[in-house]
Amino acid sequence: MTDPAPEPLSTWRRLAEGAVLLDGFHALKHAVRFGAEVPVAVTADRRAALALADELASDVRETLTALLTEVPESTYRSLVPRPHPTAVAALAVRPSREANLRKLARTPRATPVVVLDNPRNLGNAGAVIRLAAGFGATGVVTTGTLDPWHPTVVRGGAGLHFATAVERVSVEELPPGPLFALDPEGDDVRGIKLPDDAVLAFGSERSGLSAGLRARADHLVALPMRPQVSSYNLATSVAMTLYHWSLTGFQSPTSDSRRPSGDGP
Ligand SMILES: C[S@@+](CC[C@H](N)C(=O)[O-])C[C@H]1O[C@@H](n2cnc3c(N)ncnc32)[C@H](O)[C@@H]1O
């Protein structure tokens, strides 16, 4: 292997604070696919990374070829908190809050917004962002203290923060649209059509929906669940609800012919 070009490392050090860490090949692939600005990308094994691109991401292969610089394994390890099996890492520019808030506020809206009301688990938040991206939701907003752009959330979201608008807001700042709050005490979702402009709200893993969010809700909606089971996991609840919306909603993501084939995790 040749000596690392010094330029990517100095760019990395200059940008690391404030940038979004894309941890692993799949996060980089998704971010590039959905238009992220990626000023620097490194790998400890360029040949293996480009072989993955050939196999899983021919649509962005050219961009990845231009972006990826090989660095020694030890350098790669020094840049990431936890090495990823693909030995790929990159930094992306976080989309502007103003632009995301504009997207979230725009009406009429063709797909729902997901609200996580004071979520506590970073992995759940990442999984929900991945779901929202998969279903083409307009965005995911969180209330409370959890940062939806925390590196662990970005890792869980597999770089799909760039495919949907992700922001933290207060209950008072929720995007417009009929507010459907998910709660086991609500009306059975199977009898309800969720509109394309719905705001779909889910409670915290610990305590469910906050009083403030409940007070704003237009409808309380329950997922089918047999007696004696207290609740579902948060991300699982979002998955079921988005799936229910997709049955009658604006578009079916799986029928999108532009979806690249042979995609990885
Ligand atoms: C893990 S649960 C919260 C459990 C919490 N201990 C409580 O007291 O509600 C997280 C969220 O998932 C959603 N959820 C879970 N099971 C549900 C169900 N059967 N029907 C509707 N929503 C559900 C709700 O939005 C809930 O606030």
Image (spheres, rainbow, N blue to C red):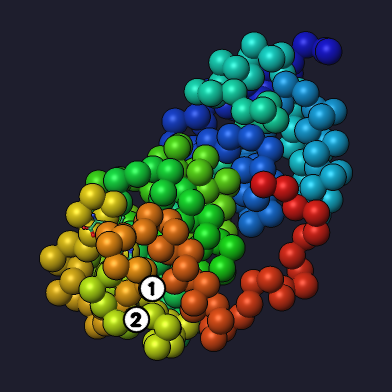
Quarter holding ligand 1: bottom left
Position of the N terminus, as image quadrant, is: top right
**Whole-percent x and y of residue 147?**
34, 45
Query: Would you say 42 lies left or right of 262 here?
Result: left
Query: Would you say 180 lies left or right of 106 here?
Result: left
Q: Of helix, strand and loop, which one carries label 2? A: strand
**Whole-percent x and y of residue 251?**
61, 80
Q: Which residue is mark 2?
A: 188
Q: Amino acid at mark 1?
A: Pro
Residue 224: numbered disc? 1
Measure the C-alpha gap from mark 1 to mark 2. Answer: 7 Å
| Residue 86, quarter of the rendered image | top right
Few, some or many residues within 10 Å of mark 1 (<14, 14–19, 20+): few
Residue at image location 52% in from the left, 40% down from the top = 155
From the viewer's side, name the closer residue of 111 and 245.
245
Marks 1/2 in contact by CB < 8 Å: the verdict is yes
Q: For disc 1, does the CB lie below 8 Å from ligand 1?
A: yes
Few, some or many residues within 10 Å of mark 2 (<14, 14–19, 20+): some
**Residue 166 visible from this viewpoint:** no
